[in-house]
Amino acid sequence: QVQLVESGGGLVQPGGSLRLSCAVSGSGVDWYAVGWFRQAPGKEREGVSCFSMGTDLTYYADSVKGRFTISRDYAEKILYLQMNNLQPEDTAVYYCATIGYSALCHETWYLDSSAGYWGQGTQVTVSS
């Protein structure tokens, strides 16, 4: 049984930082590309970042480039999202997910339909 469990969300002031974690378990997904999506109130879910296993190539949505960093601890099977300089528009439920069925992030990684297995989500609220 595949499980993705996020943690690390919370309330932060504008300009602050948070680090999200996603523990990945289950057979057959250890070498799938993994990533983060988010869904703000009243908006569709969108891709935030993708991590290609083995090559460590990373991809980001334009809205978070330079502020967010995705990384993976291979030994602990944990995916991270370091979020710096958070802004109110970053407020959303953040989900981790496996992406596609290979180790590499494909060109449409950011589409909701690209994800396979999902975590339950963690709320990030940026407000003063």
Image (cartoon, rainbow, N blue to C red):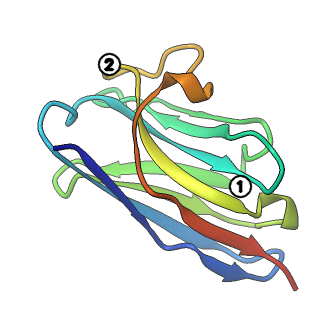
The x and y percentages for residue 76 are 19, 58
For the residues carrying marks 1 and 2, which lies nearer the camera in this image? Answer: 2
Tell me where residue 110 sits by quadrant: top right
Q: Which residue is mark 1?
A: 67
What's the residue at 61%, 68% (across, down)?
123
| Residue extending furthest toward the top | 107
| Residue extending furthest toward the front | 42
The x and y percentages for residue 116 are 39, 30
Pointer 1: residues within 10 angstroms few (<14), some, or many (20+)?
A: few
Q: Amino acid at mark 2?
A: Tyr
Tell me where residue 122 sits by quadrant: bottom right
What's the residue at 59%, 16% (across, down)?
108
**Residue contact at pointers 1 and 2, CB within 8 angstroms:** no
- Mark seen at residue 101: 2
- Mark seen at residue 127: none
Pointer 2: residues within 10 angstroms few (<14), some, or many (20+)?
A: some
* Quarter that holds the N terminus: top left
Which residue is nearer to you in this view: 120 or 61? Answer: 120
Q: Amino acid at mark 1?
A: Arg
Q: CA distance from mark 1 to mark 2?
A: 28 Å
The x and y percentages for residue 22 are 38, 58
* Quarter that holds the C terminus: bottom right
Q: Secondary structure at mark 1?
A: loop
Q: Is residue 117 above or below residue 23?
A: above
Question: Would residue 12 be found to the left or right of residue 88 on screen?
Answer: left
